[in-house]
Image: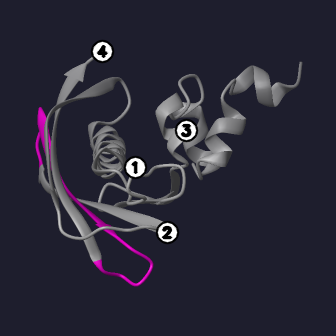
Amino acid sequence: MSDKFTLHPKADELIAAGIPAHFHSVLGPHGVGSLVTKMGIVFTHMSVESMVATMPVEGNTQVTGLLHGGAHVVLAETLGSFAAAFHAGAGRKVVGIEINATHHRGASSGLVTGTAVPIHLGRTLTTHEVVMTDEAGRRLSTCRITNMILDR
């Protein structure tokens, strides 16, 4: 058994999702979650100030060929929850308590980019706005997610 696997049993999953190596020690035991993997979500920027990830339209469509509205929400909840966890810090966990979405336009191909920015970063609650855009930079949807921060 390699040291990489011993230290980080989910290292391959983390690398595939674009998680920088310096975060592996925090996320290694848990990975990014099977839904993030199934949806093809890949993080491109991670900080408390903004969390960015992409997701392919292909494989995440409704029967009419458009990106499923639920896929927008999965991307938003993933970004908002990871951003809240970064704010909360080690030894604390976050749980989503509210999310809403407004869909502005459809996408039938390409990559969707989601960007989460904080609206409120408190001691026990965070709220993030998450905007999904297409490859041309057009807004596809806007979500708002609130997470509660708990001590472990």
Amino acid under label 1? Val
- Quadrant containing the C terminus in the rendered view: top left
Circles 1 and 4 in contact, beta carbons < 8 Å: no
Residue 109: give its label.
Answer: 2
Magenta-highlighted residues: 121-138
Residue 63: give its label.
Answer: 1
**Residue lying at 39% horizontally and 74% vertically, measured from the top left:** 134
- What crowding class fits label 1: few (fewer than 14 Cα within 10 Å), some (14-19), or many (20 or more)? few
Q: Is residue 18 above or below residue 37?
A: below
Residue 38: give its label.
Answer: 3
Q: Which of marks 2 and 4 is nearer the N terminus?
A: 2
Q: Which of marks 3 and 4 is nearer the N terminus?
A: 3
For residue 120, side relative to residue 91 (left or right): left
Q: Which of marks 1 and 4 is nearer the N terminus?
A: 1
Circles 2 and 4 in contact, beta carbons < 8 Å: no
Q: Which of marks 2 and 1 is nearer the N terminus?
A: 1
Q: Tag 3's secondary structure?
A: helix
- Can residue 123 be seen here? The reply is no
Task: Locate residue 53: give its quadrant.
Answer: bottom left
